[in-house]
Amino acid sequence: MLNPNSKVRSPLDLRDKDTLSRRSLFVRMTGFLILVGGSLPLLIGSMAEAQGKTSKETAKYQEQPKDGHSCSICQYFHPPHTCQLVEGDVNPNGWCMFWAKKT
């Protein structure tokens, strides 16, 4: 039976640093990495947008898909041949380093 006066603590609770376990550190770091990793394509895209469109050379644009990723399934692609981040016409079957899966 639970003591009503006991406090249930989340592994993300930072109030008592002396009781930081390896498990709670792992949970915190995993959450942080998922948050940062998931935001990276959006961050890159936002930075590129703020600066205007980038050249195909800078974006490492190529006319063929890479690892099954192509412009046609990228969130920055606007049919029939425009990219929100890369200058000029782009091939729907092309790819660049800003590729991010459509959500």
Image: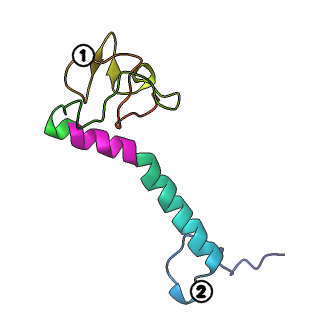
Q: Along the horizontal axis of the image, is 7 left or right of 56?
A: right
Q: Amino acid at mark 2?
A: Thr
Above or below: residue 43 compared with residue 68: below
Magenta stretch: includes residue 52: no
Q: Residue at x 34, y 22 (%)?
A: 77
- Count of residue discs: 2
Residue occupied by mark 1:
89
Q: How far across and how far down the image is residue 6, in percent?
A: 69, 80
Is the residue under label 2 in contact with that under label 1 (CB below 8 Å)? no
Q: Residue at x 49, y 59 (%)?
A: 33
Of the 4 image quadrants, the one containing the N terminus is bottom right
**Dot placed on the residue nearer the N-terminal end, 1 or 2:** 2
Task: Specify the quadrant of the image occupied by residue 88.
Answer: top left
Q: How far across and how far down the image is residue 54, in percent?
A: 19, 34
Q: Amino acid at mark 1?
A: Asp
Mark number for residue 74? Answer: none
Q: Along the horizontal axis of the image, is 26 left or right of 50?
A: right
Question: Which residue appears farthest toward the left when viewing the image?
Answer: 51
Which span is picked out in magenta?
Answer: 40-48
Q: How far across and how far down the image is residue 71, in percent?
A: 39, 23
Residue occupied by mark 2:
19
